[in-house]
Image: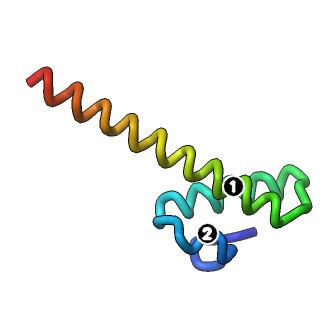
Amino acid sequence: MWTPTHFPAAMRSLNATTRAKAIEIANQLIGQGYTDKHEVIQHSVLEARRWARERSHQNERVFVTSRHTI
């Protein structure tokens, strides 16, 4: 199991929020029985980046929508 203070080097470049999501995803995959740690890490980083992009786009839409309604 990985933690916010003990995580793979491949997650170092992620910001803290995205890294936390990658750690969560990686731990879930390990818990589901995936044994190839390299594959788990790659997949979790990719999914966490996708999650962060989607989250960022949602925040932009909320800001633009709220700005136009005032």
Sort mark 2 into few (<14), some (14-19) or many (20+) by Cα contacts within 10 Å. some
Picture layout, residue 50 above or below residue 6: above
In the rendered image, residue 15, in percent from the top left (x then y), is placed at 47, 65
Q: Quadrant of the N terminus?
A: bottom right
> Is there CB contact under 8 Å for labels 1 and 2?
yes
Q: Quadrant of residue 3?
A: bottom right
Q: Amino acid at mark 2?
A: Met
Picture layout, residue 14 above or below residue 8: above
Residue closest to the far top: 69
Residue 58 placement, left or right of 46: left
Q: Residue at x 19, y 28 (%)?
A: 66
Q: Residue at x 39, y 35 (%)?
A: 58
Distance from disc 1 to disc 2, alpha carbons, whole Å, reads 9 Å
Q: Quadrant of residue 42?
A: bottom right
Q: Residue at x 47, y 45 (%)?
A: 53
Sort mark 1 into few (<14), some (14-19) or many (20+) by Cα contacts within 10 Å. many
Q: Quadrant of residue 35?
A: bottom right
Element under label 1? helix
In the rendered image, residue 27, in percent from the top left (x then y), is placed at 74, 59
Q: Residue at x 52, y 58 (%)?
A: 18
Q: Disc 2 marks which residue?
A: 11
Q: Disc 1 marks which residue?
A: 44
Residue closest to the far left: 70
Q: How is the image coloured?
A: rainbow
